[in-house]
């Protein structure tokens, strides 16, 4: 990713009614400070404290008593694709089940698209997410499924984010339908070699109808040997081996976690936050499926993140505020848990310590809400509450 703009000089965000820092040791799980201010220099937070003690600065933003949060960290999105599947969504709302079979439809349209068309979609969705407060986003390949199409998907994703994930093992493409072993060989060999220069992570859709545990393990292990970190699409459509495989391989995150048994939950808890359970309630909303049991995970001590899963099939939303609202209303997370999961939780899922928090040394990625408290994100669903977004200290 090209180096990002950073504002010169100092910038004071002043008159903050409620500052969510996510700093352990501060009041409550969100590390909330009231009547606070925050000083930014060279794209970094350099001071946080009471508004009454705010230092002088070259420029000032008056938050006017509003809530300020770390920017959302969306740790799971599929933005490189062409076409949409609105008709498939309509059929689902009329009673058809979601099977993941539509992935191959998007593979066809994506392969036929020009680089310019893919780039335009990535930028449009990236902008859409930014306007809704996302300041860090992970983007996966997975709709190319040829050596050239996976490499170009990641090259285009890398133009807008450093968090890029190689998902050549999304499904077995039609031309390999009766030769899945050969496809796994392609993914581990030439496809990985072409993709790795543009990727930080490797991911596999480990699910009945996609990749079984042996294939998934082979692919993820090859990715690790090429220096990529591991993430897994696991236990989305039914029970299966994905979560425990992710834990076995030291995955940063296992994503979906909709169908878990006690052993899955115990395995995740035993990682002590090393493997995050990333919940994607937009997918359950858009596929009309039962939501994951967030309370069971949280009560067992598992670290939980929330992300959008933005993709044209199972979850065509780029809105982290929407996911927070779903998590609170439908998954019985408290607002504090949901906001933490959408910020610090996403950062953990990406093994980042510079985002998802607002403390000296962190990146100055933050949101000023059009509301006095983080509680309003779930309390006022569907309302555009993101008044202002700063990324690297630069108002977008
Ligand atoms: O995370 N489950 C696999 N992949 C995506 C869905 C992709 C699609 O339906 O196009 C997901 O939900
Ligand atoms: Fe996904």
Image (tube, rainbow, N blue to C red):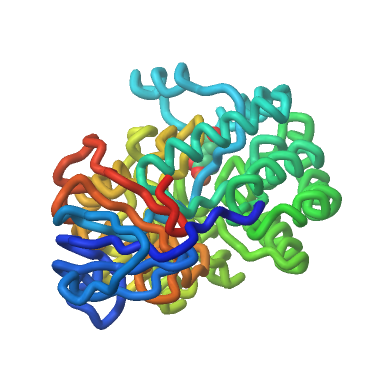
**Measuring 37% from the left and 63% from the top, which residue is drawn there?**
58
Count of residue discs: 0
**Measuring 25% from the left and 65% from the top, which residue is drawn there?**
20
Can residue 257 be seen here? The reply is no
Left or right: where does residue 299 sit relative to residue 1? left
Can residue 353 be seen here? The reply is yes
Residue 149 location (% of width, % of height): 75, 36
Left or right: where does residue 177 sit relative to residue 104? right
Eyeballing the image, is 369 above or below 314?
below
Residue 303 location (% of width, % of height): 37, 69
Which residue occupies the foreground of this view, 122 or 11? 11
**Measuring 25% from the left and 82% from the top, which residue is drawn there?**
25
Which residue occupies the foreground of this view, 216 or 222? 222
Quadrant the C terminus occupies: top left
Residue 357 location (% of width, % of height): 37, 68
Left or right: where does residue 269 sit relative to residue 192? left
Residue 267, quarter of picture? bottom left
Residue 131, quarter of picture? top left
């Amino acid at each position: 990713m090209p180096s990002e703009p950073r504002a010169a000089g100092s910038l004071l965000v002043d008159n903050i009614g409620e500052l969510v820092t996510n700093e352990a040791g501060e009041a409550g799980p969100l590390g909330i400070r009231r009547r606070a201010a925050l000083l930014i220099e060279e794209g970094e937070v350099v001071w946080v404290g009471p508004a009454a003690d705010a230092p002088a600065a070259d420029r000032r933003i008056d938050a006017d008593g509003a809530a300020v949060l770390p920017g959302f960290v969306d740790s799971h999105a599929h933005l490189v694709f062409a076409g949409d599947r609105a008709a498939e969504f309509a059929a689902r709302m009329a009673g058809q089940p979601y099977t993941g079979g539509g992935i191959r439809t998007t593979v066809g349209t994506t392969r036929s698209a020009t680089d310019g068309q893919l780039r335009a979609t990535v930028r449009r969705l990236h902008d859409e997410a930014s306007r809704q407060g996302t300041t860090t986003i992970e983007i996966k390949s997975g709709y190319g499924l040829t050596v050239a199409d996976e490499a170009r998907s990641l090259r285009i994703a890398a133009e807008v984010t450093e968090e890029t994930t190689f998902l050549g093992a999304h499904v077995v493409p039609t031309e390999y339908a009766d030769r899945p072993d050969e496809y796994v060989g392609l993914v581990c060999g030439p496809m990985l070699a072409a993709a790795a220069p543009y990727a930080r992570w490797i991911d596999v859709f480990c699910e009945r109808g996609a990749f079984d545990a042996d294939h998934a393990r082979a692919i993820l292990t090859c990715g690790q040997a090429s220096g990529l970190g591991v993430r897994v699409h696991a236990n989305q459509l039914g029970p299966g081996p994905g979560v425990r495989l992710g834990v076995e391989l030291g995955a940063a995150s296992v994503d979906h976690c909709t169908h878990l048994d006690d052993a899955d939950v115990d395995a995740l808890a035993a990682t002590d936050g090393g493997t995050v359970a990333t919940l994607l309630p937009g997918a359950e909303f858009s596929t009309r499926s039962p939501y994951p049991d967030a309370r069971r995970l949280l009560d067992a001590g598992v670290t939980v993140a929330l992300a959008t899963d933005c993709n044209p099939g199972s979850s065509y939303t780029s809105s982290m505020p929407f996911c927070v609202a779903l998590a609170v209303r439908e998954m019985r997370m408290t607002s504090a848990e949901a906001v933490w999961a959408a910020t610090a939780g996403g950062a953990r899922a990406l093994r980042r310590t510079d985002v998802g928090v607002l403390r000296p040394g962190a990146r100055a990625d933050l949101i000023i809400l059009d509301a006095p408290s983080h509680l309003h994100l779930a309390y006022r669903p569907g309302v555009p509450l993101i008044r202002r977004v700063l990324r690297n200290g630069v108002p977008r």
